[in-house]
Amino acid sequence: PKVTYELSDGTVHDIDVPCGQSVMDGSVRNNLPGIVAECGGSCSCATCHVFLDDGASSFDEPSDEERELLEFAEGVQPNSRLSCQLILAADSPDVRVTVPDTNG
Ligand code: FES
């Protein structure tokens, strides 16, 4: 599925992320800045915070663990998610996220 990443410098990157991988994986594997992913995707750092602008229907609701961690992220909005928890499926519609510059 296609994931569009809008970065804090205003650039927009379309990446084809294989199903089974996360929105975080797609960013890290393509060396996009902004998603730090300190814990490597185990839902324990909150440095992979993104705003999920489009495609929310293809993902599960955030777990309690994710919700609790999001409290540590800066500038949280109603569409805030931890991108390591956004796993693409084969039938996922296109996804668009905005990556904040406060994950470092
Ligand atoms: Fe650490 Fe997502 S990479 S919580």
Image (cartoon, helix red, strand yellow):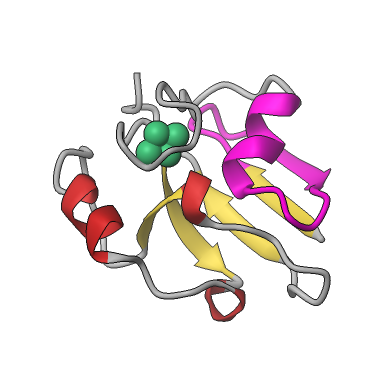
Residue 25 place in picture, x, y as percent? 65, 37
Query: Residue 74's quadrant in the figure?
Result: top left
Q: Is residue 92 toward the left or the right of residue 85 in the image?
A: right
Determine if residue 48 is in view.
no
Q: Is residue 6 above or below residue 33?
A: below
Residue visible at 80% across and 77% down? 91
Residue visible at 79% across and 45% down? 14
Residue visible at 73% across and 26% down? 29
Determine if residue 63 is in view.
yes
Q: Is residue 95 above or below residue 10?
A: below
Q: Ligand 1 falls in which quarter? A: top left
Span colored in magenta: 6-29
Residue 95 place in picture, x, y as percent? 66, 63
In the image, is residue 17 part of the stretch drawn in magenta?
yes
Residue 51 place in picture, x, y as percent? 42, 54
Q: Is residue 65 above or below residue 40?
A: below
Q: Residue furthest front?
A: 42
Quarter of the C terminus within the rendering: top left
Q: Is residue 82 above or below residue 36?
A: below
Quarter of the N terminus within the rendering: bottom right
Residue 90 place in picture, x, y as percent? 83, 70
Q: Is residue 12 toward the left or the right of residue 46 in the image?
A: right
